[in-house]
Image (spheres, rainbow, N blue to C red):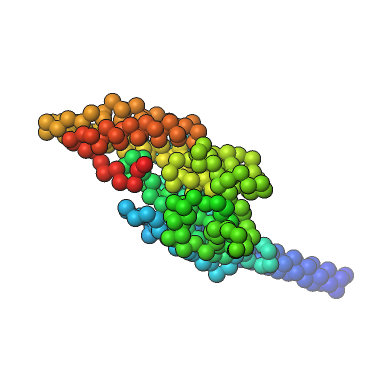
Amino acid sequence: MRMKKKGVALAFNWIFAILAGGFILFLAIYGAGKFIKTSERAIYTETAASLVGLTDPLETGFASGKAHEISFKKKSRLFFDCDESFRVLGRQRISFSEQTFGDKYGEQGEWITIKDKYIFVERELEAKKIYLFSKPFFMPYKISDLIMMVPASQNYCFHETPETIKESLEGLNLKNIIFKNQTNECEGIDVCFSNKVGCEIEVSESRGTVFKKEKGKKVHYVGDLLYGAIFSSPEIYECNVKRIKKRIDELTKIYLEKIDIIERQDCQSNVREKLQSVMGNLDSSSELINLHSLMKDVNSINRLSDCRLYDDRGFE
């Protein structure tokens, strides 16, 4: 009986040791996996934050535009969203992930908030290299820089491009924007400034609209917002237009305060009433044409004033 009890105790000890060892091994593997994922997410979050910083050199001042490229070690995904109602000026957010094994991607990093930039891009971008270019935006004073972000692997074939737009883009040396003519070939997204059949993106300069067939949506533009309309998703575009309008309103408040200051110095400005009428939310990009017309009136009055409020270079 003692031998049997010892045998049972020995067997139980072995079973317990195997189970306990297995459980400890499971915890170790699980903990290592969680640690790797946590470290991975931390790296992706830091990368997203770094990408925001890399857009700083694109600030133009009074230059006509700037461009550069960013390369990743692996094929990567960038995620964007936009919220025009966040606090005073709205926000964009960016998140990052990269390819790990095969076609699989790591877990998406944390969202990084962008408050003072206007990045026009698709909601999700997959690439190993991306091109960025910027254009200053005036209405009528300098509002901000518009930043366009596109994958280097995606060609854009521009058809019957107006000369001013062609010159504006050619100066940036973007390799994936090809101006199509009878002698060259281009495979990619067709961007047409005419009634050419079969184009994915149709631009109407007379109406100030960009229509994306794949999305089935039309947006309105003025000035260099044209590039934002072409290279971003309609949702990101509309959100950024509303954010830009909020920035216009905040700058308008500053100029109204400036009128008070110069009037104390016996320098009268006749632009106050017209400038006050600019204030108010923008419901959609379709209201840009009216806003642009109103701002032209503001600019005309400012130019005729003995006490100019701002430098209006770049505004038409």
Confirm whether residue 210 shows in the render.
yes
Residue 64 locus on image (x, y percent): 37, 54
Residue in view at x 81 percent, y 70 percent: 11
> Residue 249 versus residue 106: which sits nearer the camera?
249
Confirm whether residue 154 shows in the render.
no
Whether residue 64 sits left or right of residue 31 in the image: it is: left
- The furthest residue to the left: 265
Residue 278 location, quadrant: top left
- Above-or-below relation of 279 to 178: above
Residue in view at x 26 percent, y 28 percent: 272
Whether residue 89 sits left or right of residue 183 in the image: it is: left
Quadrant where the C terminus sits is top left
Residue 225 locus on image (x, y percent): 46, 45
Residue in view at x 58 percent, y 39 percent: 218
Quadrant where the N terminus sits is bottom right
Q: How many marks?
A: 0
Residue in view at x 44 percent, y 51 percent: 164
Residue 8 locus on image (x, y percent): 83, 68
Residue 269 location, quadrant: top left
- The furthest residue to the bottom: 3
Residue 179 locus on image (x, y percent): 54, 58
- Above-or-below relation of 291 to 180: above
- Above-or-below relation of 76 to 279: below
- The furthest residue to the front: 182
